[in-house]
Amino acid sequence: MARPSKFTPERQQRILTALSAGNTRKAACEYAGVEQHTFQRWLLRYVHFAQAVTRAEGDAEVRMMALVHQAAPNDWRAAAWWLERRRSSDYGRRDKLELDIREMASRYADQVGVDVDTLIAEAERIVRGDR
């Protein structure tokens, strides 16, 4: 005798409710008592469920963006947040990228036995095209 499926209307609704509220897929799965790999299988197997998941995530995003837009006229941080995320190439934070590059350079410098600042300076010289 086969086990009863966990793909019940109640579990589906719990997942969709959590996603509509803006939760991550991981949190939605935990809320519904479903393993993430099971959720992924359901998305592939049940087209109507996958469409409902996409709608729920879209609804949450639209609601949250409406709140950001409502707040922007009175709070510059809302506008800055929007620009930083939607136009990241122009307004995005660069400090994380610089930190990641420095961390990678540090590891490489340790491997080859050179000073990290010397390595970074040499890389910057090459990027600038200095000879």
Image (cartoon, rainbow, N blue to C red):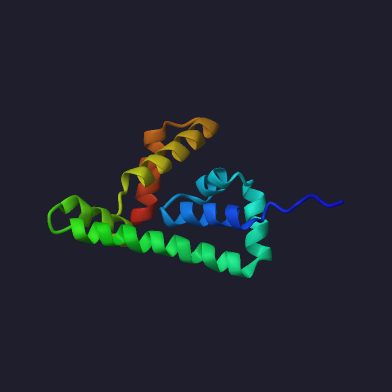
Give the camera-side residue of 35 and 98.
Answer: 35
x%, y% of residue 109? 48, 34
Residue pictured at 36% horizontal, 48% vertical: 124
x%, y% of residue 88? 32, 58
Residue pictured at 58% horizontal, 56% vertical: 12
**Residue sticking out furthest to the left:** 74
| Residue 89 seen in the figure | no
Give the camera-side residue of 114 and 46.
Answer: 46
| Residue 108 seen in the figure | yes
x%, y% of residue 14? 53, 52
Give the camera-side residue of 104 and 78.
Answer: 78
Residue pictured at 64% horizontal, 56% vertical: 8
Q: Quadrant of residue 115?
A: top left
**Residue sticking out furthest to the right:** 1
Side of 20 where 14 appears, left or right: right
Residue pictured at 36% horizontal, 43% vertical: 96
x%, y% of residue 104? 47, 39
